[in-house]
Amino acid sequence: MSLRSGLAGVMVAAALAVAPSISGAQAIAKAGEPPTVVMQNLAFGPAPADLKVGETLVFRNDDSFRHTATARGDFDLDLKPGHSGSVVLKRAGTIQVTCRYHPTMKLTLTVAPLPALGDSRQ
Ligand SMILES: [Cu+2]
């Protein structure tokens, strides 16, 4: 439970920091703060729960190193220290994220399909 409240504080801070830069994605984002992954101490923070296709996910680099959030075939953000960026999750399933500069940095995202789509296989 203490983890939960700590995380909430981080996410509020992220939303405030990122708000000016996500206007292009706001049509897709739900109201309130977008789910955020914080990069710190050469690691990705915890993956947000309940990610869905079409949702905007923010990566924020709180480290003093440059990092990328790279998922082959899905997205590739290059973030200087103190910068953040967002991606739109385009497919359901498991997405493996790493940093091109620090291959030991790993994150697994689980993205749920849109409920209305049901079976979205081609
Ligand atoms: Cu890195």
Image (cartoon, grey):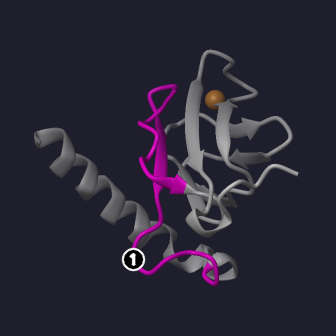
- The answer to whether one can see residue 70 in this image is yes
Task: Tell me what residue is drawn at x 61 percent, y 74 percent.
Answer: 21
| Residue 39, position as x, y percentages in the image | 50, 39
In this image, 33 relative to 68: left or right? left
The residue nearer to you, when weighing 116 against 80, is 116
Question: Is 37 within the magenta?
Answer: yes
In this image, 41 relative to 73: left or right? left
The residue nearer to you, when weighing 116 against 13, is 116
Q: Which residue is mark 1?
A: 32
In this image, 30 relative to 98: left or right? left
| 103 w.r.t. 110: above or below | above
Helix, strand or loop: magenta stretch: loop
- The answer to whether one can see residue 67 in this image is no
Q: What quarter of the picture does the N terminus occupy?
A: top left
Secondary structure at numbered mark 1: loop
Residues rendered magenta in the picture: 26-51
| 38 w.r.t. 12: above or below | above
Question: Is 33 within the magenta?
Answer: yes
Task: Tell me what residue is drawn at x 39 percent, y 77 percent.
Answer: 32
The image quadrant of residue 116 is: bottom right
| 52 w.r.t. 108: above or below | below
Which residue extends farthest left?
Answer: 2
The image quadrant in which ligand 1 is located:
top right
Task: Tell me what residue is drawn at x 46 percent, y 40 percent.
Answer: 47
